[in-house]
Amino acid sequence: MIQLGQYPPPLRTIAHISDTHFLADGRKLYDAVDTAANLERVLAQLEGSEIRPDALVFTGDLADLGESGAYRALRSSVEPVADRLGAALIWVMGNHDERDRFAAELFDEAPTDAPQDRVHDLDGLRVIALDTSVPGYHHGSLSDAQLDWLRGVLSAPTRYGSIIALHHPPMPTPLLWAMEMLELHGQDRLASVIEGTDVRGILGGHLHYSGHSTFAGVPVSVAAATCYTLDLSAQGRLLSGVDGGHSMTIVHVYDDRLVHSVIPIGAHPEVTAFSNEYRARIESMSFAERLDMFSSKSSSFNVMNDEE
């Protein structure tokens, strides 16, 4: 595909998915939400698209109760899709997850209560899975040992830089006051480790809605949950979870920036479209011809489509 604009193709692509909240034995969350079916729709839409990610990154709360059966069900659902896409699979701990079963069921490792921090190399792009969970609690924190480990990892830059994937995003939640009780503690300590390194972005979950911010000069992107999302405009509620508004975020990594695109999940009525048959015609044109045909408001192409 030829380059039409000022930017070259991205160097790497990541599908960012979060908060699956699986339960064992096919049980529904709150006896209402089929979390497995919701994720299947996300994965089917991704696989049926032309997006070919280098990695699938799941930013925590993978299993609602940390059950072994839930992790096994999640793994059996996701691994075949990742294999068909040729994508690496990156799991991140959340506050609903349990470290021993997380390690045993997703990584085939011996059960452990140690933080589940890992480094993944996407052919020059470093993705750091950082465990912000606190055993027995829902807020987030990082120990001195974890920060020392992260400092050591970031001491040597990589070709395309680093992305940190964690569960508790270091950002304010102005539309969700109650979430302040469950935020990542000691954020200034994390900022002191990240500043001046090759960290180019932070991917998070936890909030159950999409959001963007900056932290230590680095962009932060939160992916909405696939289980249920929060209605931030609901009245008379500290929070209102709804089985709708699901999405995934696609992260494109360029040499000098990241681009985050939120993709809603589900089929919706198509009101206008241009098919792929235009691609060959566009590629055969010169830059000036493309401007005359597709940018000019008076071109036959635009006049025809405006009349329709």
Image: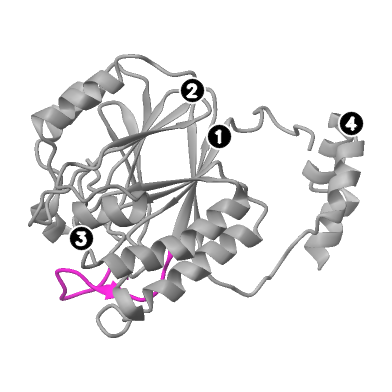
Quote the CA–CA distance across marks 3 and 4.
55 Å
Decide: is 193 above or below 94: above
Residue plotted at (48% across, 60% down): 78
- Give the magenta part as a residue range: 229-246
Which amino acid does the dot numbered 3 rest on? Answer: His
Q: Where residue 286 is drawn, which disc sits there?
A: 4
How dense is the environment of label 4, judged by Cα within 10 Å: few (below 14), some, or many (20 and up)? few
Quote the CA–CA distance across marks 2 and 3.
32 Å
Query: Which quadrant holds the C terminus?
Result: bottom right
Which amino acid does the dot numbered 2 rest on? Answer: Tyr
N-terminal-most mark, 2 or 3: 3
Which amino acid does the dot numbered 4 rest on? Answer: Ser
Residue 226 shows up from this direction: no
Query: Which quadrant holds the N terminus?
Result: top right
Q: SS at mark 1?
A: strand
Residue plotted at (30% across, 74% down): 24
The answer to whether mark 3 and mark 4 are in CB contact below 8 A is: no
The answer to whether mark 1 and mark 2 are in CB contact below 8 A is: yes
Q: SS at mark 2?
A: loop
Residue plotted at (54% across, 23% down): 255
Q: Is residue 304 left or right of residue 71?
A: right
- Which residue is tagged 2? 160
- Which residue is tagged 3? 96
N-terminal-most mark, 1 or 3: 1
Q: In the image, which is nearer the foreground, mark 1 or mark 3?
A: 3
Measured from the top left, where is residue 121 in percent x and y? 45, 30
- Which residue is tagged 1? 12
Q: In the image, which is nearer the foreground, mark 3 or mark 4?
A: 3
Measured from the top left, where is residue 7 in percent x and y? 64, 28
